[in-house]
Amino acid sequence: MRWIVFDYGEVISRQSEALPVLADLLGATTDEFTTAYWGERHPYDLGCSDLDFWRAVGERLGTRVDEALSARLTEIDVAGWLHPDKGTLALLAELDEAGVPLALLSNAPSSFGRVAERQAWTRHFQHLVFSGDLGVAKPDERIWRELARRLGAEPADCVFLDDRQVNVDGALAAGMSAWLWRGSAGAREELVRLSVLDGRPG
């Protein structure tokens, strides 16, 4: 039985709608904030603290961030990513019911990981892996080795689904099967093709 490994952001979750609120707290336009947010995101996904991340974002925007503001920004940011896609949830439930082993591999800070672990959808997963806990993020080749080690599986036994081509390419280079996420309906069709699921409606 193959492991099916899901990304989180914009695969299980919908795109965050919190960025305009965060931008307002930092006195920036949404476009200015979005550029700063993603420009500083990689160190955050590698495990830097919430405060260090928000201070770096604030520096780009000319706004000082103290601990209280950092905590508020983190709370809003985490909540913004906690809106799962109904179609993906249905697919997870179908895979779980079919006995397919599931894992999550997400580029996400540890603070998000601790909240995500308490969400109802996680009951479908045997393993939840967040880059902030590892100090390494997709598409770094080391994260695929660590994932396979945690699963007790060979890379060829894993199928990885992600909405970013660079991460799909990283999984393929590591010896996994992988494809670009284009929605739950398309993913289900591919899983049927691979005989992971049968062809009956889920």
Image: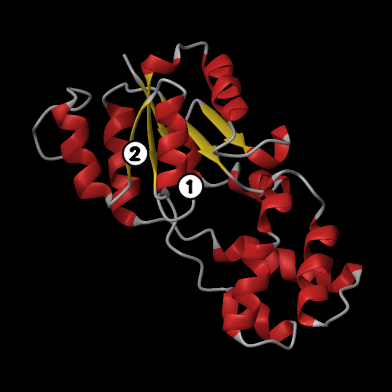
Position above or below: 62 against 190: below
Is 190 displayed left or right of 118 in the figure?
Answer: left
Question: Which residue is located at x 32 percent, y 55 percent?
Answer: 86
Is 53 displayed left or right of 96 in the figure?
Answer: right
Q: Position of residue 22 (x, y in %)?
A: 66, 77
Q: Position of residue 158 (x, y in %)?
A: 39, 22
Q: In front of the other: label 1 or label 2?
A: 1
Callout 2 amino acid: Leu
Q: Quadrant of residue 35?
A: bottom right
- Note whether residue 6 is visible: no
Mark on residue 122? Answer: none
Callout 1 amino acid: Tyr
Figure disc tally:
2
As helix, strand or loop, the secondary structure at mark 1 comes to loop
Q: Residues within 10 Å of mark 1 (few under 14, many from 20)?
A: many
Q: Quadrant of residue 94?
A: top left
Is 75 displayed left or right of 101 in the figure?
Answer: right
Is 19 displayed left or right of 190 in the figure?
Answer: right
Question: Which residue is located at x 66 percent, y 81 percent?
Answer: 23
Are dots 1 and 2 in contact, CB under 8 Å? Answer: no
Q: Give the residue at mark 2.
A: 92
Q: Quadrant of the N terminus?
A: top left
- Note whether residue 98 is visible: yes
Question: Which residue is located at x 83 percent, y 82 percent?
Answer: 63
Q: Position of residue 49 (x, y in %)?
A: 82, 52
Q: Give the residue at mark 1.
A: 8
